[in-house]
Amino acid sequence: MRRGLRHPGVVGTHEDHAPALAAELRAAVAGDVDFSVTARALTTMDASNYRRVPVGTVAPRDADDVAAALEVCRAHGTTPVVARGGGTSIGGQATGTGVVLDLTRHMGGIVSLDPESRTAVVRPGLVLDRLREAARPYGLTFGPDPSTHGRCTLGGMIGNNACGAHSVAWGTTADNVSSLDVVTYRGARLTLGRDGQGAPPGLRELVDRHLALLRTGYPAGLPRRISGYALDALLPERGTDVVRSFCGSEGTLGVVTEAMVRLVPLPADPVLVVLGYADESAAAEAAAGLLPYKPLTVEGMAADLVRGGTAALPRGGAWLFVEMDGAGPAAGLVRAADALDAAVVSDPAGQRALWRIREDAAGTATRMPDGAEAWPGWEDCAVPPARLGAYLREFRSLLGEFGLRGTPYGHFGDGCVHVRIDFDLWTGKGVRDFRRFSEAVADLVVAHGGSLSGEHGDGQARAELLPRMYGDELVGLFGAVKGVWDPDGGLNPGMLVHPRRLDEGLRFEGLPLVGLGREAARCVGVAKCRTEGPSSGPSVMCPSYRATGEERHSTRGRARLLHEMALGEVVTDGWRSEEVREALDLCLSCKGCRSDCPVGVDMAAYKAEFLDRHYAGPLGLLRRPRSHWTMGGLPRWLDLFGRGVNTATRLPFAARLAGVTPERALPRVAGRTFVSWFGERGSGRPSALTLWPDTFTNHLAPEVGRAAVRVLEDAGLGVSLPPGRVCCGLTYVSTGRLGAARKVMRRTLDVVGGVEGPLVVLEPSCAAALRTDLPELLPDDPRAARLAASVLTFAEALETLAPDWAPPRLDRPVTGQTHCHQHAVLGDAADRRLRARAGLTGEPAGGCCGLAGNFGFEPGHYEVSVACAEDQLLPALRAAPDGTTLLADGFSCRTQIADLAGARARHLAEVLAEGLEEGRER
């Protein structure tokens, strides 16, 4: 049975026939065929505002699989097919209603790399950074470098004709592709090149009949013209370049199975010049004048994107980030720039610090200063560079007319502007305004001789508006060309030609305005959580994805499943969903996404709420894993039984009874608690602070508490403890027992609610819980906010309360692990400064240790736990020279290091206390 035609030549397959289609595909392809609820839910969205529900997914292994899958889909009711790479498309072009081809799973390799000819042959699912890493030893790179370079694929870049910051020097993807192997929907295998090579029958004849239109219908002087089909590349005077005309076709003409791309030399001596201007318009108007000096980049941003302050930047209200090759050219550029101020930076570390300001601005653009959400929808138009200043002034004025807010930034040297806007996409009026604004700004772009898309393609977001840019006749020719390549209309229908309305199928339709689904919808799909390979720098997100490589174990994948659960169309069993539970099972609750996700998705909090509701009710209580009662209730058990827990863990089958994996040895309970030690010794000074006796320090690592008291008192700070038992509730939160967590937190507030002054917390996970989970779970109790505001880490306490104290000089290298929650919630700037003052050189590893409280102890998690440690922690330990001190403030991190490396890591307080004792002995 067929659905009615949505667009000419396109017929959707009814879901009732999905099992038969899946069976035929499994028989035809060697790759993976997945029509499960999870697979469909993970691919309903990309990084746009749109949603289309597929019937299933296919991960082909090679070009033969692609051809076989297309043949089955064509025979089975002209089932639509969309090729998908990293799923980071902004316009909706990586979603589809039929079969989604996942080209990342098996078709992501480098076939060959020839440094002499400066070419590489790649498969479409290859992530850009993998190609750049392979080319770097030869002093080469692939020129186009979109900001998603750590997860976007070459096939997706070809589909969208991607650009990036270096396009002023190296052009778009189309400028860097030599040939393409593609498969059409009807199964033709073509190798595309110049001089008409690979053109399907009828294409050249169609072009010959419309030469005048192709010569006059495209805007001139526009380096970032990405909208529509690049049919002017087929003009004879331009070499009848079929491969260039195919780039940017958004998967509507054929499926790329292999590509030969050109490589460019890396700059020999990169120098970053940051130029300060009075305002955004001045910076935009200056950008075009810098192009004769052959810059590698000309990136622009204004002060309203630098919310951390502009002290690190030259004077001004807006800046151009210009990369030059060589100090001489950089100096010449500064002399000619007529800027208010300039900074010239040659050292790589300084360049990275400044580039980080520019990169952070892109994340800042997704949120307004008041925390309101900003969305794509008018993300990346481009105008001739000389028109950019005037365009930006009128664009800002148009935003004001519609009562909208957005902060432009982008590739000023190419006239390309990125902006996220606080559209109201939840209400009928808001959607109508979204449409009206899109139409108005399209007219503004066209009035300036620009392109509706300057980087990410049209997709559904702008295809409907293409007649405003090109006119009906040229857009009609687009449709005719689509008909030559894909007469059945089976490839990515609704994109570029016969488009869906720009306000149709928005992903927010049907979502409640509040609740977990609304929170999950803040994920815009840019997939920073899907960065492949070992993480670099301070990023933590997303350890489980890096361990498994599976979308459902990424932050984005989990957010998509929660989104679909809230809608109830694909995931139909709500809070009882096993698909959602399985995806969340490998979430370590590391909180990395809370800080590293550009839009602040907080999967740890979402997981806690889901588990709380998933196991609600009497039957739910019985279905809960044992570890939720044992590890999740650890503070209670230790308070009740103390050292008796050690005896229990030696019993036969103790691990199984406790719901703990047999690969792990349970931590030993100390012979004496920290609280009892402190109570017997007393304190001779008036209290300056309250030291929090967290469960881990009190029962499992009292030596940390004793060391902290020693250091704090040496710094002249009197220490006291709370007047009763306290607990932050962390273990209850992480196992989704939110009712129990609230009870524990309220009892704690009853004990410490009247305590004045700073509260110093040694365990990072407990400090993070008190700062964030406590006020979020008890928003109506003013004591919670007060307590959260009083929390200091050990290093913060020393810096704030004893600024003149001099730590012991240790002068030794360190490595180890920065706790995930410290990275995500607390920050480690004070720790870095304290280590530097003590002469501790080097840095603890980034990423996640992989134990993550109860996670690494639970059955089925051990392999992932170890894989997370292998990301950064274990390699850092192996590479450490003899005599290196191992630091890990988190109890979980120290436990993981002991289990997997057989080494003892210590809290910073322990290392400093030992230094004080050594100094006394000397």
Image (spheres, rainbow, N blue to C red):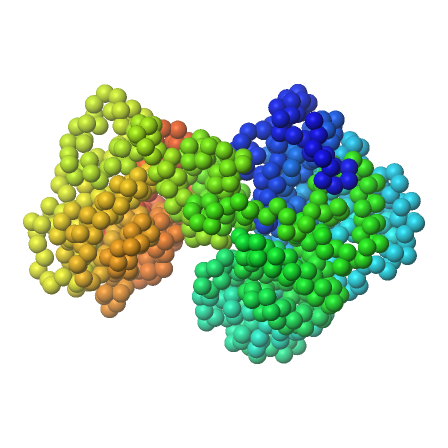
Residue name at image x 28 percent, y 30 percent = 665
Residue 483 visible to an observer of this rendering: yes
Can residue 189 be seen in this snapshot? no
Frontmost residue, 900 versus 771? 771
Work out which residue is located at the far front of the displayed protein and give it.
428
On-image quarter of the N terminus: top right
Residue in the image at 53% along x and 52% along y: 426
- Residue at left 23%, top 20%? 652
Front position in the image: 564 or 205? 564
- Is residue 107 placed above or below 881 in the rendered structure? above
Q: Horizontal and vertical percent for residue 585? A: 41, 34
Question: Quarter holding the C terminus?
Answer: bottom left
Counting from the top left corner in percent of width and height, residue 125 is at 64, 39
Q: Nearer the viewer, residue 645 or 745?
A: 745
Q: Would residue 833 be found to the left or right of residue 83 on screen?
A: left
Compared to residue 770, the image places residue 555 above or below, namely above
Residue sitting at x 23%, y 65%: 801
- Taking the image as shown, residue 87 lies to the left or right of residue 241, namely left
- Residue 460: x and y in percent read 67, 49
Q: Nearer the viewer, residue 706 or 249?
A: 249
Snapshot quadrant of residue 904: top left
Instruction: Please tell me whether residue 717 is drawn above or below residue 658 in the rendered image.
Output: below
